[in-house]
Image (cartoon, grey):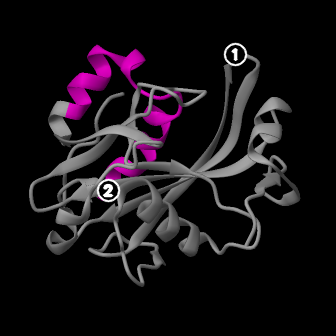
Amino acid sequence: MDQLLIWVDENDEVIGYGEKLETHRREQLHRAFSVFVYDGRNDRVLLQKRASGKYHSGGKWSNACCSHQRRGEAEAEALRNRLKEELGLDVGPAEIESVPSEGNFCYMGKFTYYAPFDGLAEHEVDRVFVYRIPRDQEGQLMANPEEAEKLKWVARPELERWLQREPQAFSAWFSRALELAWPAMEPQGGVQPAF
C-alpha cells in the first residue's frame, strides 16, 4: 500500500490518485472519512483537539479521527489503521455495518465540502462512520501528538450546547459530519439536535 490519496468525481467515483500536499494545493476533490467514537454506556462522544501544527483546522476540536483512505487500502482497513495511528486504538477485526453495534463501524452517509486554508484547500467527499467503543478498549486511547494535542470525552447534550455557542472552535467539516453521525449516537427514541 502507498500513501496516495484517492481522487474522485462528484459521484465519488475514483478518477486518479495524488500525494497529500499536491491534492490540497490543487484543491482536488478526494475521498476522506470522519469517525466518531461513541461511548454508549455513558452517552458521550470522543473529541480530539487537532495538533496546532496541522495546516488546516490546527488547534480546533473535531471528531475522534479525520483522515483518508489510501490507494490499495480497503475502507474498513483504512478506518482500523487510522484509529490505531491517531488514537492508539486497536479495534481488531471491526467491520463496516449498516446499523450501530458495539465494536464495529456504522456507515452514516457522506457529504461534499470545500474549505480553503492559506493557499491550500480541503475539497472532500467525507464518508461518516460511528464506532461504538467497547469498555475494554477505552484504556487504549492515547493521542498521537502529530495528529492531536488532546482527547476529550463530551456528553452529547454538552456537545450540542458547545457547538451552538462556539462553532468556530470546531473543524470546518465537524458540524456537517456530526449531523450525519448523531442518529447512531443517541438512545432509542431520542430527539435530533437542532444545529
> What residue would you read off at disc 2?
37
Asked which secondary structure carries label 1, the reply is: loop
Task: Indicate the amino acid at tag 2.
Answer: Val
- Left or right of 96, for residue 63: left
Q: Residue at x 80, y 41 (%)?
A: 23
Name the image quarter holding the C terminus.
Answer: top left
Q: Residue at x 37, y 48 (%)?
A: 64
Name the image quarter holding the N terminus.
Answer: bottom right
Asked which secondary structure carries label 2, the reply is: strand
How far from the left and from the top, in percent, is residue 44?
Answer: 18, 48
Q: Main secondary structure of the magenta part?
A: helix
Task: Indicate the amino acid at tag 1.
Answer: Asp
Residue 118: which numbered mark, if any?
Answer: 1
Depth check, mark 2 against mark 1: the one in front is 1
- Residue 118 in magenta stretch: no
Q: Tell me whether the residue at label 2 lies in contact with that at label 1, contact meaning CB atoms closer than 8 angstroms.
A: no
